[in-house]
């Protein structure tokens, strides 16, 4: 299984179908610039696994390293997605293992992620990979409802 860390605009474009399937709010005109900006200035990494004929990403993980007063250096996983056609093949687990390995070699003690309440298969994977339900995450913003604030 080949894991590729995105460094170019072409690699971001290679992930387009998976990115847009998972993050439907992205804008086709600006998503490459946005992700390259995050990579360049926000310690963001995007890692993908190509499909069997190497025409698109079958799965991807997006994460960043940040410093928090509570935990010190931490890896936060923004996104983890596997195309439905490739689920059950171990891709998400391999991507999580990749992040875990990076945390180990950089001596980072904590990896955090948020997950929607109804994503039971994902939760099972996270628990099997050693994650625990450490807290509830609260959020506020118009993106959470169908009635944005005026």
Image (spheres, grey):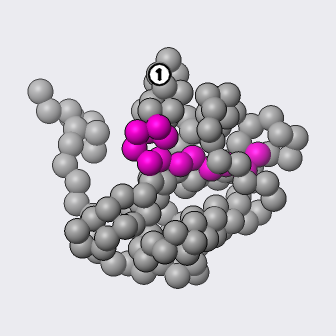
Query: Residue 49: within the magenta?
Result: yes
Rendering coords of residue 42 (x, y %): 40, 44
Residue at 14 percent across and 33 percent down: it is 149
Residue receiving disc 1: 30
Image coords of residue 107 (percent x, y): 49, 74
Vertically, is 4 above or below 109? above
- Tell which residue pokes out farthest to the left in this image: 150
**Can you see residue 132?**
yes
Percent from the top left, x then y, of residue 18? 62, 40
Q: How many numbered marks appear?
A: 1
Q: Would residue 79 be seen by someone viewing this image from the given angle? A: no
- How far from the left and from the top, in percent, is residue 103? 52, 70
User: In the figure, 64 relative to 38: above or below?
Assistant: below
Q: Quadrant of residue 9?
A: top right
Q: Residue at x 53, y 27 (%)?
A: 32
Q: Pick out the residue farthest to the front.
A: 106
Where does the magenta region start and end?
Answer: 38-50
- Pick the front one: 126 or 62: 62
Q: In which quarter of the image is the N terminus?
A: bottom right
Please tell me which residue is depicted at 63% across the width and 41% down the height of the picture. Answer: 6
Badge 1 crowding class, 10 Å Cα cut-off, few under 14, some 14 to 19, many 20 or more, is few
Check the picture and name the quadrant holding the C terminus.
Answer: top left
| Residue at x 27% of width, y 65% of height | 68
144 sits left or right of 114 in the view:
left
Residue situated furthest top in the rendering:
29
Horizontal side, residue 52 vs residue 113: left or right:
right
The relative height of residue 42 versus residue 3 in the rendered view (above or below) is: above
């Amino acid at each position: 299984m080949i894991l590729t860390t995105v460094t170019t605009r072409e690699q971001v474009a290679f992930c387009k179908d998976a990115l847009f399937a998972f993050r439907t709010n992205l804008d086709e005109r600006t998503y490459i610039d946005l992700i390259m900006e995050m990579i360049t200035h926000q310690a963001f990494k995007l890692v993908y696994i190509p499909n069997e004929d190497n025409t698109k990403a079958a799965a991807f993980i997006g994460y960043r390293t940040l410093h928090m007063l509570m935990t010190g250096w931490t890896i936060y996983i923004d996104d983890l997605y596997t195309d439905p056609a490739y689920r059950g093949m171990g891709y998400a687990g391999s991507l999580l293992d990749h992040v875990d390995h990076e945390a180990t070699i950089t001596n980072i003690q904590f990896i955090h992620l948020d997950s929607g309440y109804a994503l039971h298969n994902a939760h099972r994977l996270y628990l099997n990979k050693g994650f625990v339900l450490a807290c509830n995450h609260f959020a506020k913003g118009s993106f959470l409802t169908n009635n944005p604030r005026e």
